[in-house]
Image (cartoon, rainbow, N blue to C red):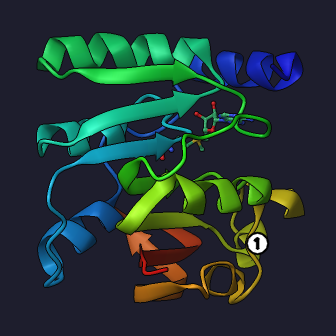
Amino acid sequence: MATEDQKHWDEKHAGGHGEEAHSPFLEEIFYKGSWSIPPGRALDIATGRGRNAFFLAERGFRVDAMDISQVALQEAGKVAEAKGLTINFIQADLEQAALPEMTYDLIINCNFLERSLIPKMKSALKLGGHIIFESYLVDQRVLGHPRNPAYLLGHNELLDLFRDFRILYYREGKFVESGKAAYRARLFGQKVR
Ligand SMILES: C[S@@+](CC[C@H](N)C(=O)[O-])C[C@H]1O[C@@H](n2cnc3c(N)ncnc32)[C@H](O)[C@@H]1O
């Protein structure tokens, strides 16, 4: 476990880092598009305080939710219990963690970028499984955090990273949601081979 990373994120989460409402991108995919994503096994990458894992569990998915921060997972666990949701929270350093092969019907990755994990995410999906991926674009630096280029996607980079998937939705640029602006790339795709 990268203890410095864990300490850093534990401190952030202890200070109340993150949003409570699930990502608007999930609304877009589940309700505004014409896609059907039947409930199955799901993995929430870097779940944080669990907002997106709750969304999936409430819709009948069996969710594994991973994060490096024990503080975030404990908070998420309390909320899940209060909501009556069963979620399998797993503490893991996703810079190094292995993922089980051909296991998930859906993987979501929101506001987290670990490029070395992407081949593992692809292997962890079942054939026909879906990926919902969103993270910050390089342009975000002008607005605020994150600013470290290691955590920012280049233009078209996310699209290129999933070229072997069937791309069902892709958009990158400035999103203004709930009065807040951010530069993001958003992709919804399906494993087809
Ligand atoms: C910006 S938050 C996003 C949380 C969540 N996906 C969401 O959208 O609300 C980034 C998350 O990545 C986690 N994280 C950072 N480095 C990590 C690592 N190496 N392994 C696993 N999780 C990590 C942090 O603890 C934090 O919860």
Q: Residue at x 19, y 66 (%)?
A: 37
Q: Which residue is mark 1?
A: 142
In the figure, is residue 161 to the left or right of 5?
left
Q: Is residue 184 left or right of residue 190?
A: right
Residue 88 position by quadrant: top left
Relative image position of residue 130 (x, y in whole percent): 37, 67
- Is 180 above or below relative to 33? above
Between 172 and 99, the one nearer to me in the picture: 99
Front residue (pair 155, 178): 155
Where on the picture, by quarter, is residue 111?
Answer: bottom right
Give percent across and percent down for residue 104.
Answer: 39, 50
Q: Residue at x 12, y 42 (%)?
A: 60
* Residue type, numbered disc 1: Val
Q: Position of residue 81 (x, y in %)?
A: 21, 11
Callout 1: CB less than 8 Å from ligand 1 = no
Give the residue at x 23% y 44%.
55
Up-down: is 61 above or below 159?
Answer: above
Res 15 visible: no
In the image shown, does 5 or 42 lie closer to the viewer?
42
Name the quadrant of the N terminus: top right
Say which element carries label 1: helix
Q: Is residue 147 left or right of residue 26?
A: right
Q: Nearer the viewer, residue 84 or 147?
A: 84
Task: Please state the quadrant of the image where ligand 1 appears.
Answer: top right
Q: Residue at x 47, y 53 (%)?
A: 102
Q: Is residue 83 visible?
A: yes
Total numbered circles? 1
Q: Is residue 48 above or below residue 104?
A: above
Q: Residues within 10 Å of mark 1 (few under 14, many from 20)?
A: few
